[in-house]
């Protein structure tokens, strides 16, 4: 589990943006919303949730961090060099931050425990029968 004494490192695909997580993730799961599909190019994304943005800090490459602020939902952060998705939400605030699991360099200490936005899941990509709770839209924390 990430902590200030044993931070969990992460980066974008090209390594321009390096960051660390110093708090435990409180939840993790799959999002099947259309926005995640379009950004990731996959039928769903896998995210780990920090209770607030104070558990994530940028170590290097802050000038390469770009943010897309859609009209609804959380801001989406990505590397302006390689386009790699990093997190949603705003680190350094009291709001929730969802870190893309694929950018982490080690074991996050948490397993997926839900699937949300099943109403947007494409018919051509069957959802595994993994026993996880399923939510038609956004899960309520």
Image (cartoon, helix red, strand yellow):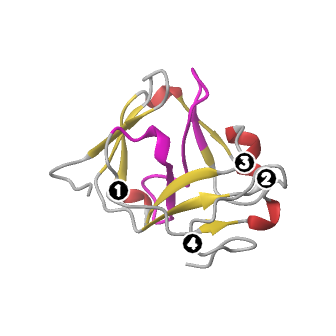
Mark 1 or mark 2: which is in front?
2
Q: CA distance from mark 4 to mark 3?
A: 18 Å
What's the residue at 45%, 38% (across, down)? Answer: 103
Residue 91: image location, x then y, percent: 45, 52
Which disc, if any, is residue 43? 3
Looking at marks 4 and 1 on the same chain, the residue that comes earlier in the sequence is marked by 1
Mark 3 or mark 2: which is in front?
3
Mark 4 or mark 1: which is in front?
4
What's the residue at 69%, 74% (across, down)? Answer: 135
Q: Quadrant of residue 74?
A: bottom right
Q: Residues within 10 Å of mark 4 (few under 14, many from 20)?
A: few
Residue 100 counted in the magenta span: yes
Which disc, if any, is residue 55? 1
Magenta stretch: give its range: 77-105
Mark 1 residue element: helix
The front one of 58 and 126 is 126
């Amino acid at each position: 589990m990430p902590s200030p004494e044993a931070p969990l490192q992460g980066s974008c695909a090209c390594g321009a943006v390096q960051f660390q997580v110093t708090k435990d993730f409180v939840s993790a799961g799959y999002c099947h919303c259309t926005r995640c599909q379009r950004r990731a190019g996959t039928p769903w994304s896998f995210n780990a949730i920090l209770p607030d943005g104070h558990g994530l800090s940028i170590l290097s490459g802050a000038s390469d961090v770009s943010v897309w602020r859609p009209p609804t939902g959380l801001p989406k952060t990505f590397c302006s060099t390689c386009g790699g998705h990093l997190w949603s939400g705003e680190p350094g605030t009291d709001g929730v931050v969802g870190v893309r699991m694929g950018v982490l360099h080690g074991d996050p200490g948490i397993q997926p425990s839900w699937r949300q936005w099943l109403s947007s899941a494409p018919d051509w990509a069957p959802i595994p029968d993994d026993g996880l709770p399923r939510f038609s839209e956004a899960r309520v924390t």
